[in-house]
Amino acid sequence: MKKILKIMTVFLAALLLFAACKKDDGKQNDNSKSTGTAAPKDLPLEKKTFGGMTFRVFSDYNAPDALDFTDFALEGDSEVTIDSAVYRRNALVSELFDVKLECASSQNDTFVPEMRKQMRSQDDIYALIATRFVSSRTLILDDCAYDLLPYSETLSLDCNWWDQAIQTELAINNRLYLIDGDFFFKHYDGVELLQFNKRIAEDELADTNLYQLVKDGAWTLEKFRELCTGISKDLDGDQLITSDQDRFAFSSQIDAVSTFIISAGNRLVSHTSDGKIEFTENTDKIYQTIDKVLKFYVDETWDAHRDVACAYGPLKIFSEGRSLFNWTMARFLENPLNREMADDFGILPFPKYDETQADYINYVNFYHGYALMMPSSVKAPDDVAYITNALAFYGKQLITPTYYETLLTTRYVRDDESAEIIDMIFVNTTYDMAIYYDIGGIRDVLQKSFYEGQNVFSSAFAANRDILARDIDEINDYEGTS
């Protein structure tokens, strides 16, 4: 029955992909998938060609923590399935529209300085920037980016090869500088999720079905705390819980703090009806969320900082069968440690605040997540918008199904239930402006309680109120490039 439903879902998704696009409410992401095997449909815009124009993408690369964006560096077809799909998409776009695709990457911390240099010179070198969210505020406020809304029709921004949530959540003064979608599979790689060890779950959680908890809407912070209780165990008998020998309820790194808070439905800023951002004043719930998370994050488990514990940190511990839950991102599912893991694992979303929360909210990591930006030095923005749209449109047909089905739901995910959970996660991704732009130093404010082992959010936040107000004013006063 599951296989029949899956076939029906793929068939309907293929029909929906090529139906007329209608504007969503900005909060609903249509990440429907086609099979990727049929001949690709034609771009639903008037056919244009560009006389051999070079279309170069510059990506933010900060080894070893960021993603190496090489989608246009492929010189030929490949035995690697995802590389082959990217190559076929690139070859098709190059042939159809007579463009030459190239890419370049920054070296470690040179991305922002390089873009500032280009903006000063106004050299039209790069058609697009693939920026990490952590760099985006600086680039936008330094006048490095075009507002993309004037090109929304050419970009087909209301269609399902573009993520709709980012267009609402990261808009500034009714302007749009960042977009995400099927242009590149890195869009999915930065989505955060949880793994669980099936052997430990079977041994320790009695008759608890974690997948069913998620489907029933009962996967909450309190349930997570309950299940973490009593799991950490001294395996070597030395009366200590240490990273190299013992078992933990949860292995993670500090990124998980923001994710728990965002997944519980918290936001520091929101948009007003005129497109400005404002402080939400809903700090009581943030305080309460931190209280809930501290109960399992500090008291009853171990925070496996990657750079302190060992190589790969939390994933190494998890892959050795020594933690029940593990913080991760979609990009880490292809890590060799996962592939070589003896125990079976499953996939879960981050938990809700409580059962009254309508949906599971799935956060795109501020450091590892990528978005596209058009540099303000581009001399032919309409042409760039057209090619960008074509790359996303054909990426939806040729790349995303391969990434999704081969890398996630077949090769690296080990059961049908986890594949269904990934469906749920990718359909409802979210982008948080306060954390991405570090408004009011909020990243440190949120993490401070976890470093200190007690809830100091109220005092830390109060100390940053002036910075918060200044940052909000700076964003609201920004009027774009002249």
Image: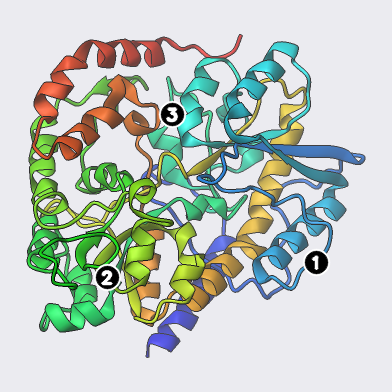
436 relative to 347, above or below: above
Q: Are marks 2 and 1 in contact (CB under 8 Å)?
A: no
Count residues near mark 1 (Cα–Cα under 10 Å), then give few for <14, some for 14-19, many for 20+: some
Q: Is residue 56 left or right of residue 206?
A: right
Can residue 144 be seen here?
yes
> Mark 3: which amino acid?
Ala
Where does the N terminus fall, quadrant-wise? bottom left
Q: Position of residue 220 (x, y in %)?
A: 14, 59
Q: Do the residues labelled 2 and 3 touch (CB within 8 Å)?
A: no
Q: Position of residue 432 (x, y in %)?
A: 34, 36
Where does the C terminus fall, quadrant-wise? top right
Can residue 273 be seen here?
no
Q: Is residue 356 left or right of residue 26?
A: left
Q: Is mark 2 on a helix, strand or loop?
A: loop
The residue lying at 17 percent from left, 64 percent from top is 217
Q: Position of residue 314 (x, y in %)?
A: 34, 58
Residue placed under numbered mark 1 in the picture: 77
Q: Which residue lies furthest to the front in this view?
A: 238
Going from N to C along the chain, the mark reached first, 2 or 3, is 3
Q: Are marks 3 and 1 in contact (CB under 8 Å)?
A: no
Residue depth check, mark 2 versus mark 1: number of the one nearer the observer? 2
Cα distance in 3D space between marks 2 and 3: 42 Å
139 relative to 324, above or below: above
